[in-house]
Image (cartoon, rainbow, N blue to C red):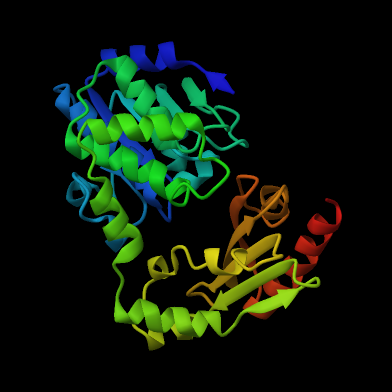
Amino acid sequence: MIDQRNEILALLNSGSSFLVVSHENPDGDCIGATLALTLALQGMGKRAVAFNDDFVPHYLRWLAGADELVHTADPAAFDVVCVLDCGAPDRIGKLTERVLAHPRVIDIDHHGANEGFGLANYVAPTASSTSELLHGVLKFLGAELTPGIATCLYLGIYTDTNMFKNANSTPEAYQACGELVAAGAESMTVAKRVYIETTAERLQLMARVLSTLQIDDDGRIAGMVCTQRDLHEFNAKPEDLETFVEHPRAIIGVRAAYLLRELEDGVTVKGSLRSNDDIDVAEVAATLGGGGHVRAAGFRAKGTIAEVRALLVEKLRRAVADQ
């Protein structure tokens, strides 16, 4: 753990303009934390801009401030750059080098691989989410937790714990969410917009992807794949695959699960890994150039989807055997 919250508070109080960035291919914790900090700084009378290399997923576009997130920015034009939920700076995307060149970078994250690349760092791998950490920072800062900010932070915790079903659903995570609901977080709206509402295209895509289910290692490994052809056939987007990996993970007896998606270039595959018990999928992802958490990780690898699947299954076999 790296705890430089005092230094972070000093930078947040002294700066007048802030660029708030997070990782590419954003998820709920990433967007929730980004928007919450941006809104909180704006509420303090400061200039704050939210940036991401990619577009906000459709199921998150209703959040306060989502329509103001930008995809181009010059870090040098801001007093402070805040980097949220990035286990490594290269996950920022095209602004990585310019962010690292900035003299005042705040790094708030909950990934174990993060060694602290900012001037001031707050890295706590035992936390449920970056949104949980940011909630504490904003309390110390004395920022007003409006219902919009509270909803963003609640969503970040709720999604990164997979509706409080993951092992990172700690007492601190529950306590933070209780405080956020008391502050006006729209908990029922979050559940409805993120996990209940869907589209016909997404259901059709799910049926296709489920048909690719493959069980290996006597039922201990399970996974599915999605090709570009599948996405195009159902007019679906990559974000429609969100949570699909939880289906093979839920099979009784499965210890490690995966979802592979073919990228547009046809020679790169994006993988999402999940585990039950103590299988460290972050270690597996690291051997393929990725990373993440013990029970949830990801990577990108060159090759056809069949080649990457064969390679991944063999690596997961070894990981399961070592436990």
Q: Position of residue 108 (x, y in %)?
A: 45, 30
User: Residue drawn 44% across and 45% down?
Assistant: 92
Count all numbered tags in the image, as a single digit.
Answer: 0
User: Residue drawn 63% across and 77% down?
Assistant: 305
Give residue 204's quadrant in the image.
Answer: bottom left
Give residue 37's quadrant in the image.
Answer: top left
On the rendered structure, is 200 left or right of 48? right
On the rendered structure, is 181 left or right of 239? left
- Residue 247 or 286: which is nearer the viewer? 247
On the rendered structure, is 122 left or right of 224? left
User: Vertically, is 33 above or below 302?
Assistant: above
Q: Quadrant of the N terminus?
A: top right
Q: Does residue 237 appear in this view? A: yes
Q: Does residue 93 appear in this view? A: no
On the rendered structure, is 205 left or right of 67? right
Q: Position of residue 303 (x, y in %)?
A: 66, 73
- Residue 173 or 153: which is nearer the viewer? 173
User: Residue drawn 23% across and 53% down?
Assistant: 189
User: Residue drawn 52% across and 34% down?
Assistant: 170
Farthest residue to the bottom: give it.
233
User: Vertically, is 5 above or below 191?
Assistant: above
User: Vertically, is 187 above or below 7?
Assistant: below
- Residue 313 or 267: which is nearer the viewer? 313
Q: Position of residue 216 (x, y in %)?
A: 76, 74
Q: Position of residue 78 (x, y in %)?
A: 27, 28
